[in-house]
Amino acid sequence: MKIYESLKKIYESEAKKDGRFLRSYKDDFYKIDKEFIKEDACPGDRYIGVLKSNGCGTFLNRLNCKGEFNSAQERILEGGDDSKFYHITFSGINEGTIEEVTYDQALDMSRTVPENPYRKPRRFTLREQLAEMLGIKSMGGTQFDRGFKIKDGDVTAIKIHVDSLNRGVIEVARVKMSGDYDDYDLQNTKKIDEFFVPVGFDKAIELKEPIYLSAKVKYEPFAELTSISKRAFTNAVNKAKQKTMDSELSY
């Protein structure tokens, strides 16, 4: 069965029968849960869906017990024993089975069901992908991590290279900023920026030849990276410069 569509029918049916369910925070299911079901869940994954009895939306958590308290347990406990619980098993992309379970059964699963051993992530965050290209473990704590924000709908041209001092450099040109930014962020976010970042030894050699990319953000913090030409990056920089000038003149 189609997981999202089937779960939608179940939740909406329960909400019609019992006015406690789905009174508010409906984006929990219609946006957030939908995203994880359709964009993130992998064959072999098992999840617990919680239709919250307090009417404040839903929870959806992957079962990946590692012997310690985890987010699935936390959400089940928060839902309480008068919420509705559903065990979801994925056999494919948005395909699988849904079984209603009790509070105790859901809690037991959260404590005993291990991570899917065959799981291969379907998507990666922008920072994860850049870290791999730079040959480092994480972007955490770097200039880029602290200084570059993204939101759903953003498009950014990126240049990655190593400078004459063997420093990793990420240059960005904002092609499109989504409507989710407030006026302050739109006014103060640099349309063109440069960040110095660590780089692994092997990558320092490779990145003497720059890499040019387009980063399209559908669901923050995840991004789709595609290769672009040097010319396309230069065009993006020129357009971003013009936007900056226009913004300064209007201000």
Image (tube, rainbow, N blue to C red):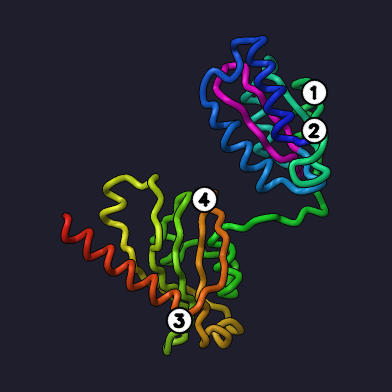
Q: Are marks 1 and 2 in contact (CB under 8 Å)?
A: yes
Label 1 vs label 3: CA separation? 54 Å
Q: Secondary structure at mark 1?
A: strand
Give the quarter of the figure containing the C terminus: bottom left
Relative to 22, residue 182 above or below:
below
Q: Which residue is mark 3?
A: 167
Disc 1 vs disc 3: which is toward the camera?
Answer: 1
Residue 101, disc: 1
Magenta extent: 47-67
- The numbered mark, 2 or 3, whose residue comes first in the sequence reads 2
Are the two marked residues, 1 and 3, in contact with CB atoms closer than 8 angstroms? no
Q: Secondary structure at mark 4?
A: loop
Alpha carbon of mark 2 to alpha carbon of mark 3: how far?
A: 47 Å
Kind of residue at disc 2: Met
Question: Mark 3 and mark 4: span between their CA atoms?
Answer: 27 Å
18 versus 188 height, above or below: above
Mark 4 lies on residue: 220
User: Mark 2 vs mark 4: which is more N-terminal?
Assistant: 2
Q: Which residue is mark 2?
A: 109
Mark 3 and mark 4 lie on one chain; the one further toward the N terminus is 3
Residue 44, position as x, y percentages in the image: 82, 46
The mark nearer the N terminus, 1 or 4, is: 1
| Three-letter amino acid code at the position of disc 1 | Val
Q: Are marks 2 and 4 in contact (CB under 8 Å)?
A: no
| Tag 1–tag 4 contact (CB < 8 Å) | no
Q: Using the numbered discs, state the Cα–Cα distance from disc 1 to disc 2 in whole angstroms.
A: 10 Å
Residue 19 image point, x, y percent: 60, 10
Q: Is residue 26 left or right of residue 188?
A: right
Q: Earlier in the sequence, mark 1 or mark 3?
A: 1
Residue 158 in magenta?
no
Query: In percent of the image, x 55 and y 22: which residue is there?
Result: 56
Mark 1 or mark 2, which is nearer to you?
Answer: 1
